Image: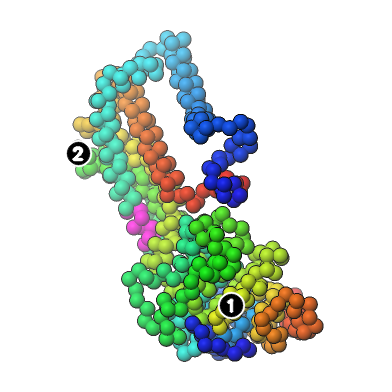
């Protein structure tokens, strides 16, 4: 784990205790999550990997307070997910860019900051700072991902990869102590994906933000994370945890190192174990 | 995108044709206008030319079918008279539309945010949808008198269903991922409504408004047929009584002209408000 350096906004810790969640679909009940417990340290980059239907996206949404668990408890430092949400402690990056087509790039980036300014005041921040104090300069962030010349463009004028970068910048510019990413690069082509990993790490390394990163890609999970959690399906549960010992800052060359290969092998093996022997 | 960066507005058809000699912008603009308007004018001339020709060749009597020349002559004879009555009809249609718009938006907001209200109101809307609204004109006149009220109510009733349906569809046509992003920073329901649902509903509402321009005019005119003292519908009903077919037709033409102008205004509004929703010609 990285040493948490004092900076504009510190990451917040996450603890998930014995969380259960069932969904009802066509009259049948499906266990999306069964007794899931984990904790994420402040400033840690945690990846969650697993087969489709293992509940990793559900877990992400429960942490973010978008779904309520049937049983169990989630804490963001000392706050509930809803309290954390009320003080803008989460930066969410969904699988699609999810930009507003009638707002310019810069308008989309500042959207989350603008939310709640209509009449409502914030109660208190889960990290003592008000959301306004934590926000990062949106233009500087756009500059960092090479999108500054497109600040006044509309989303439809941008490529898919560029739109996804805008979505990343939108989440980062909020300066939230926790970033929740739900397969943010899954819809991109292979080459764009590879480049995005290191851009993400560049932007992330400036402030110690806690990241929960849901992915399908083993190499993505290993090169980005401090820890990789493997999940199994039916019922969704934590299968194994892999500590990634690669030094930071991470570089593209590391993907060819033996250390990387060993970690990737471990993750692949536990993924396979999670579905082998319980086939159809 | 690359074409956009040059700062020159590139039309869909120009991209393939404009490689020839340099032409001043005014000439290019004139060419574009000609190209977009000319087919409409030709079709118009063919339609009315054929009509005029048919009437003259068959020597059909003026009580059965009036020649376009006679209709335009009638309009030319008393333009102020038709304009004044068209203005009255337009006002009735406009107020009716406005009332329906307000009620439809309010009902759509309620229905989108409450499943119970959705289930309660849907049967009523379906009922209204299958009711032959125009048949309500006589009782409406009996209830509401000879003033503008029955006409306004009529225009409102006939435009309500398309406005309500499009408003609910539009308010619901949001991207679930964007909705979640807004929820992740605790955006309130009114804020999600204003920031997400309203802009998403604009294309639907403007499309409905285009349809409703014609419907509102029809509603107002039909209500005017019964015991009124002004409006294009009143002209039609009176002229019919005195068997002045060319006056009836002149009133119809005045109504058509009014409708075309109003649809044009709505279309302009559409382009102004919804630049973001249009497909980039360079991408297709």
* Local crowd size for mark 2, using a 10 Å CA cut-off: few (<14), some (14–19), many (≥20): some
Residue drawn 61% across the image and 60% down it: A160
Which is nearer the eye, B35 or B84? B35
Label of residue B121 in the image: none
In magenta, the rendered stretch is B103-111
* Camera-nearest label, 2 or 1: 1
Left or right: A92 as drawn, with respect to A123:
right
Measured as percent of width and height from the top left, residue B112 is found at 41, 62
Instruction: Give the camera-side residue of B155 and B243.
Output: B155
Is B274 above or below relative to A150?
above
Kind of element beneath mark 2: loop
A259 relative to B271, above or below: below
Residue position marked by numbered label 2 in the rendering: B147
Disc sitting over residue A204 in the figure: 1
Q: Position of residue A214 (x, y in %)?
A: 63, 76
- Residue B269: % across, % down: 40, 45
The residue that appears at 63% across and 32% down in the rendered structure is: B20
Asked if the magenta segment contains residue A28, the reply would be no
């Amino acid at each position: 784990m990285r040493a948490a350096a004092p900076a504009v906004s510190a990451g917040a810790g996450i603890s998930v205790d014995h969380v259960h969640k069932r969904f009802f679909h066509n009259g049948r009940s499906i266990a999306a999550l069964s007794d899931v417990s984990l904790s994420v340290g402040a400033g840690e980059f945690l990846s969650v990997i697993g087969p489709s239907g293992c509940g990793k996206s559900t877990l992400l949404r429960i942490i973010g307070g978008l779904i309520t668990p049937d049983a169990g408890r989630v804490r963001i430092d000392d706050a509930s997910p809803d309290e954390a949400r009320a003080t803008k402690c989460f930066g969410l990056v969904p699988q699609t860019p999810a930009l507003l087509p009638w707002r310019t790039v810069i308008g989309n980036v500042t959207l989350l900051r603008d939310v709640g300014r209509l009449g409502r005041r914030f109660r208190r921040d889960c990290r003592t700072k008000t959301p306004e104090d934590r926000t990062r300069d949106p233009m500087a962030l756009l500059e960092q991902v090479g999108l500054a010349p497109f600040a006044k463009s509309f989303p439809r004028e941008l490529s898919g990869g560029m739109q996804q970068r805008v979505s990343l910048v939108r989440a980062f510019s909020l300066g939230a102590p926790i970033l929740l990413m739900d397969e943010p690069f899954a819809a991109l082509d292979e080459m764009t994906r590879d480049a995005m990993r290191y851009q993400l790490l560049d932007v992330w390394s400036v402030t110690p933000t806690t990241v929960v990163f849901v992915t399908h890609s083993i190499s993505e999970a290993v090169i980005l994370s401090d820890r990789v959690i493997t999940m199994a399906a039916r019922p969704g549960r934590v299968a194994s945890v892999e500590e990634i010992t690669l030094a930071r800052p991470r570089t593209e060359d590391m993907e060819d190192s033996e250390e990387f290969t060993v970690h990737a092998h471990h993750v692949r093996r536990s993924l396979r174990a999670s579905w082998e022997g319980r086939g159809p | 995108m690359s074409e956009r960066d040059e700062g020159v507005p590139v039309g869909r058809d120009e991209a393939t044709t404009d490689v020839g000699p340099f032409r001043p912008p005014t000439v290019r603009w004139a060419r574009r206008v000609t190209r977009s308007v000319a087919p409409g004018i030709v079709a118009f001339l063919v339609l009315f030319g054929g009509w005029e020709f048919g009437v003259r060749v068959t020597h059909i009597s003026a009580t059965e079918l009036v020649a376009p020349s006679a209709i335009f002559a009638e309009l030319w004879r008393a333009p102020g008279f038709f304009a004044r009555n068209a203005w009255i009809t337009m006002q009735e249609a406009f107020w009716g539309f406005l009332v329906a718009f307000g009620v439809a938006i309010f009902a759509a907001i309620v229905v989108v945010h409450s499943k119970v209200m959705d289930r309660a109101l849907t049967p009523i809307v379906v009922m209204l949808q299958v009711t032959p609204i125009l048949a309500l004109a006589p009782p409406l006149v009996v209830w509401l008198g000879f003033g503008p009220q029955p006409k306004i109510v009529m225009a409102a009733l006939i435009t309500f269903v398309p406005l309500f349906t499009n408003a609910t569809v539009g308010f619901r046509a949001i991207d679930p991922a964007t909705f979640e992003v807004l929820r992740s920073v605790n955006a309130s329901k009114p804020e999600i409504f204003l920031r997400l649902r309203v802009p998403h509903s604009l294309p639907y509402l403007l499309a409905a408004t285009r349809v409703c321009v014609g419907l509102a005019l029809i509603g107002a005119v039909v209500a005017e047929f019964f015991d009124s003292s002004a409006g294009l519908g009143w002209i039609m009903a009176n002229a019919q009584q005195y068997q002045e077919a060319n006056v009836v037709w002149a009133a119809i033409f005045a109504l058509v002209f009014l409708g075309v102008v109003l649809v044009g205004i709505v279309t302009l509004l559409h382009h102004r408000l919804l630049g973001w929703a249009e497909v980039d010609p360079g991408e297709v």
